[in-house]
Amino acid sequence: MPTQRSADAGSGRSRRSVLAALGSAGAGTALSGCVGSVGSAVGADGRGASGAAGDSDGRPVSVLAAGSLQLAFSEGLRAAVDRPVRVEAHGSVTAARLVAEGKRDPDIVALADTALFDRLVPADWHAEFATNALVVAYDGDGEVGRRVGSADRWFAPLLASDATLGRTDPDLDPLGYRTLFALDLAGEYYDRPGLRDALTDRRSVYPETSLLSRFETGDLDAAVVYRSMAEDRGYDYLDLPTEIDLGDPARADTYGAVSYDLPTGETVRGAPIAYGALARTDDESVAEAFETLVDGAYLRDHGFAVPDEFPEYSGDVPRGHRP
């Protein structure tokens, strides 16, 4: 039986209710994929409205990030950096495309899948700085959710025709295609052919921030999310076996047996979850913020795993960003 983790009866639940209220208030923003920014408005190029980020007059360093990093960056990173930091967050595929198409020009890009730096973002290098794992968050206040939390096999209550398992869009977001990887692996692990098809419904696919809003308001019985997201928001959740959760670097061969075809014709393969970041200027303030970002000390407080050997740099690292 998967490990069950309950939200704290005090702080976790109260924080979840606050987040739910914020999600309802910002539904338009959530549906667009942007989960907010810190400080003054972000211009269309992803920089501060009054000019380039991170220059000598104290303007913010702009960070375009994966949605799962939003709270960690807006709270932990911002507190750890002396200079103002502005965060804009989207699904990682969307964020990468915004940069590749010239629609955003951030100082730093941080994505939930390092493979995107090879496929979409024009980059000669990046730093791998954190890992994560998939979990099943469940609504402990709902009947189906409670049964998910206590079942010997977490998916059994979700096979009922009226049960809802939320997930994100695999065409926009690594969490989406990683969810499909996990469900394919679960079918093999539990000897249940067709499990992925039985558990997936296009009507339960949402942008990442909309998924969280719907889960927090009780519209979904369960959702596949990153462990960091569940811990950050005080969700009740189940740990999945390491053969399924994409969180064990030693199981790269197991994860690599599954894949998903993107609408672009590209095929993405299962792999251990890895977050990567790229600094796009050599400005001193950007370099300082980037060093703090990839150092990762604050990330552990937000449910991420940071191996001792991280950050790991790949490619032709510019002199100003070399470890």
Image (cartoon, rainbow, N blue to C red):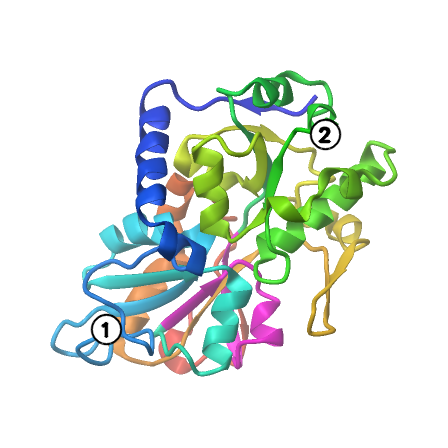
Closer to us: 131 or 4: 4
Quadrant the N terminus occupies: top right
Amino acid type indicated by mark 1: Gly
Q: Residue at x 78, y 45 (%)?
A: 184
Q: Residue at x 45, y 64 (%)?
A: 110
Residue 257 location (% of width, % of height): 82, 54
Query: Residue 76 appears at what percent x and percent y?
Result: 30, 48
Q: Is residue 157 above or below residue 312?
A: above
Residue 161 is marked as 2
Numbered badge on residue 48: 1
Other residues around mark 1 within 10 Å, as few (<14) / some (14–19) / many (≥20):
many
Contact (Cβ within 8 Å) of mark 1 with mark 2: no
Q: Is residue 109 magenta?
A: yes
- Tell which of 266 and 63 is nearer to you: 266
Q: Residue 98 location in percent, x, y?
A: 46, 74
Judge whether residue 238 can be spotted in this image. Answer: yes
**Bounds of the magenta segment:** 108-130
Q: In the structure shown, which secondary structural element does the residue marked by tag 1 occupy?
A: loop
Tell me the mark number nearer the camera, choosing from 1 and 2.
2
Q: Magenta includes 24? A: no
- Compared to residue 238, the image places residue 213 above or below, namely below
Whether residue 257 sits left or right of residue 136 in the image: it is right
Mark 1 or mark 2, earlier in chain: 1
